[in-house]
């Protein structure tokens, strides 16, 4: 079943979503994220037919929120990596992930390992999930090291790396700024832009960011 079996097609919102997700080879149904989150609570992933981009988003939410042991969820994560057609899929998954805190290390190591894959969107999934769920003093240096390894012209990966790095600069400036210097020119450019767009970057700290090259 597709989302349109539950949520009516919304042409106006679909056009807006398709404009925001130009890399997706799937059309949009126009269903909103709140609608998808509500639907995710009463549908099984096995019943989802991938027709629209929102079907993938629904799958991402269901897989992320399922209460199952890590070994079982990992299999679903690997299946989801076949459908990373847009930034909205990676980011929706990252913001939806739930897990047993007793298995936190297993989840952390899995998403860290995604950063070593060849597929750019799998790397982005790893980075934005690490940023959303595993950003702390213990892990920050290891996460930053993955960003410094990225050398690509893939815009969505560079943007995901810059988003993660800009958050690190705000939370852990001393460590993150050292890593900033080791990143590609494009990631540095996008990171500086993201930092200056943040309302959390102000005063003397903002002046320091403005001087970054």
Image: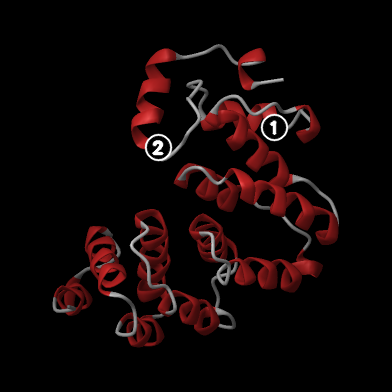
Q: Is residue 6 left or right of residue 76?
A: left
Above or below: residue 139 compared with residue 68: below
* Image mark for residue 40: 1
Which residue is at a point 55% across and 69% down the rendered structure image? 115
The picture places residue 68, in percent across and down from the top left corner, at 84, 52
Give the x, y percent position of residue 16.
35, 26
What's the residue at 51%, 55% (across, down)?
121
Q: Between 74 and 211, which is closer to the camera in this rendering?
A: 74
Residue nearer the viewer, 112 or 150: 150
Choose the circle earlier in sequence order: 1 or 2. Answer: 2
Contact, CB < 8 Å: mark 1 with mark 2? no
Q: Which residue is mark 2?
A: 21
Category of crowding for the residue at label 1, using alpha-carbon neighbours closer than 10 angstroms: few (below 14), some (14–19), many (at least 20):
many
Q: Is residue 14 above or below residue 149?
A: above
Q: Quadrant of the C terminus?
A: bottom left
Residue drawn at (61%, 29%) of the image: 55
Check disc 2: other Cα within 10 Å, few if <14, some if 14-19, many if 20+. some
- Residue 101, placed above or below residue 155: below
> Which x, y percent locates residue 174?
36, 87
Question: For the image shown, how many numbered marks are present on the structure?
Answer: 2
Residue 203 image position (x, y, % from top left): 18, 73
Q: Nearer the viewer, mark 1 or mark 2?
A: 2
> Image quadrant for the N terminus?
top right
**Which of 137 and 5 lies nearest the eye of the viewer?**
5
User: Residue 69 sits in which quadrant?
Assistant: bottom right
Q: Quadrant of residue 163?
A: bottom left
User: Which residue is depicted at the point 23% across and 62% down?
Assistant: 193
Q: State the CA–CA distance, disc 1 to disc 2.
A: 21 Å
Q: Secondary structure at mark 2?
A: loop
């Amino acid at each position: 079943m597709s989302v349109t079996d539950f949520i009516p097609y919304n042409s106006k919102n679909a056009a807006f979503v398709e404009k925001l997700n130009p890399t997706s080879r799937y059309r949009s149904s126009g269903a909103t994220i709140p609608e998808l989150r509500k639907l995710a609570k009463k549908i099984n992933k096995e019943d989802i037919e991938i027709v629209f981009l929102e079907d993938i988003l629904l799958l991402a939410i269901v897989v992320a929120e399922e209460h199952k042991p890590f070994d079982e969820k990992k299999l679903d994560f690997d299946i989801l990596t076949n459908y990373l057609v847009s930034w909205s899929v990676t980011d929706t998954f990252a913001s939806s992930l739930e897990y047993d805190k007793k298995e936190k290390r297993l989840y952390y190591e899995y998403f860290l390992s995604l950063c070593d894959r060849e597929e750019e969107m799998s790397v982005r999934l790893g980075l934005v999930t690490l940023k959303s769920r595993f950003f702390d003093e213990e892990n920050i240096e290891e996460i930053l090291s993955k960003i410094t390894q990225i050398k690509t012209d893939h815009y969505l990966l560079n943007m995901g790396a810059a988003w993660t790095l800009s958050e690190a600069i705000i939370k852990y400036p001393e460590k993150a700024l050292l890593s900033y210097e080791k990143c590609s020119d494009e990631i540095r450019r996008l990171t500086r832009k993201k930092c200056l767009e943040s309302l959390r970057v102000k005063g003397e700290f903002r002046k320091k960011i403005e001087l970054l090259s």
